[in-house]
Image (tube, grey):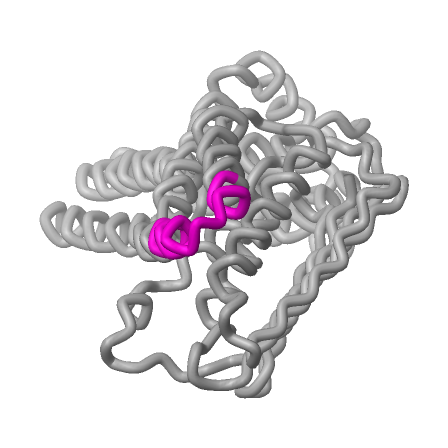
């Protein structure tokens, strides 16, 4: 029986951990799984031991052990590792917390009905009251006492995910294919003895590289710095494609009311994707970029034509890491204070991003 129990325990634990890995807070969830499985192993082992040696003769005590204790432990896990951390800076008696507390205590009270003497609604009410007014205050005291240790893993892991996303994002920006195209364009300009255009292109490229190396490491930057980087990138792309009359690039970037701070490098990946997938030197292509700011919001829209990549195109096998990274960073930095929509019909691709600052 012990070997069977241990085998089931290991299998269940591995299944739960594999499900937890898909979450952004993997280590935090795995820590909770370890606590739950440790409790279940100790609890089940105790029951087997007591039954094997016939230590307890009264069925009420077994009923107490098998129903009452797991229900209280479930309330403890739910409150300490889910409900109370969710509270944040909100008051304890906020609608958000109270409704969830009433629901979870209601669910966890159902097993207690079989232990407390009585019948019907009165029994259920006793069980519910016990979860609300005994288990909840005790778990709240435990959470407040150990809040630092409980939240430490969650905070560290969130920072780790953000750092990983930033590093991945920085790597995605250093696109050799784009840099070589720009350098080839500058070389062609130099051959035409147009020193002003060449110098201007080199300066814009230098400003972009400087921005990526320095300001990209900051949590937030002034909006005008992000706009300057965006304009430099578009200007270089126009320089690269100006020899093709079938390529239309329109940018309507308004700096009015753009006095906010924004996380760096959130807008440029959407533009990079537009040039990556929307420009063809053999077919008619277009890109339209619009940026507007209000006192509270930033609205950014990008339209681009769509073309099927050829087998010789070096960008064909590159994954769309830019958009995925932007979405991950938006969730980490702005939470629910952003809206992003993506649409495409095979001929045109459209991205709309609204950020509440």
Residue 299 appears anywhere in the view: yes
Rendered residue at 21%/37% (across/down)? 49
Rendered residue at 81%/39% (across/down)? 258
Give left or right: position of 117 versus 187. right
In this view, 21 is above or below 351: above
The one nearer the camera, 346 or 85, is 346
Residue at the top extreme of this rendering: 145
Residue 345 image-quadrant placement: bottom right
x and y, in percent, of residue 235 in the image: 58, 52
Residue at the left extreme of this rendering: 3
Asked whether 185 falls inside the magenta stretch, the response is yes
x and y, in percent, of residue 247 in the image: 56, 75
The one nearer the camera, 44 or 203, is 203
The one nearer the camera, 217 or 94, is 217
Asked whether 310 falls inside the magenta stretch, the response is no
Rendered residue at 73%/30% (across/down)? 133
Quadrant the C terminus occupies: top right
Q: Main secondary structure of the magenta part?
A: helix
The one nearer the camera, 335 or 300, is 300
Residue range (magenta)? 183-199
Residue 70 appears anywhere in the view: no
Rendered residue at 56%/87% (across/down)? 347
x and y, in percent, of residue 26 in the image: 38, 42
């Amino acid at each position: 029986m012990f070997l069977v129990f241990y085998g089931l325990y290991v299998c269940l634990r591995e299944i739960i951990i594999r499900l937890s890995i898909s979450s952004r807070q993997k280590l935090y969830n795995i820590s909770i799984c370890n606590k739950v499985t440790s409790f279940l192993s100790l609890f089940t082992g105790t029951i087997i031991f007591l039954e094997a040696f016939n230590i307890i003769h009264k069925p009420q005590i077994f009923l107490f052990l098998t129903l009452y204790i797991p229900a209280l432990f479930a309330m403890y896990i739910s409150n300490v590792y889910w409900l109370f951390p969710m509270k944040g800076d909100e008051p304890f008696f906020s609608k958000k917390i109270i409704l969830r507390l009433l629901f979870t205590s209601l669910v966890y009270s159902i097993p207690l009905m079989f232990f407390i003497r009585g019948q019907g609604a009165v029994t259920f009410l006793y069980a519910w009251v016990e979860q609300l007014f005994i288990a909840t205050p005790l778990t709240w005291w435990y959470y407040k006492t150990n809040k630092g240790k409980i939240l430490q893993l969650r905070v560290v892991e969130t920072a780790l995910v953000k750092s990983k996303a930033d590093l991945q994002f920085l790597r995605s920006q250093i696109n050799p294919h784009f840099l070589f195209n720009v350098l080839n364009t500058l070389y062609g300009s130099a051959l035409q003895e147009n020193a002003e255009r060449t110098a201007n292109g080199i300066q814009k490229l230098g400003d972009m590289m400087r921005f990526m190396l320095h300001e990209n490491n900051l949590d937030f930057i002034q909006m005008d710095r992000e706009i300057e980087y965006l304009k430099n990138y578009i200007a270089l792309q126009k320089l690269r494609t100006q020899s093709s009359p079938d390529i239309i690039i329109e940018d309507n970037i308004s700096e009015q009311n753009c006095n906010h701070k924004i996380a760096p490098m959130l807008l440029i990946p959407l533009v990079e994707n537009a040039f990556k997938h929307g420009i063809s030197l053999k077919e008619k292509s277009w890109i339209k970029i619009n940026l507007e700011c209000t006192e509270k919001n930033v609205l950014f829209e990008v339209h681009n034509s769509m073309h099927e990549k050829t087998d010789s195109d070096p960008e064909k096998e590159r994954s769309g890491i830019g958009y995925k990274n932007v979405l991950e960073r938006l969730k980490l930095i702005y939470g629910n204070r952003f809206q992003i929509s993506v649409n495409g019909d095979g001929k045109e691709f459209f991205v709309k991003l609204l950020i509440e600052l």
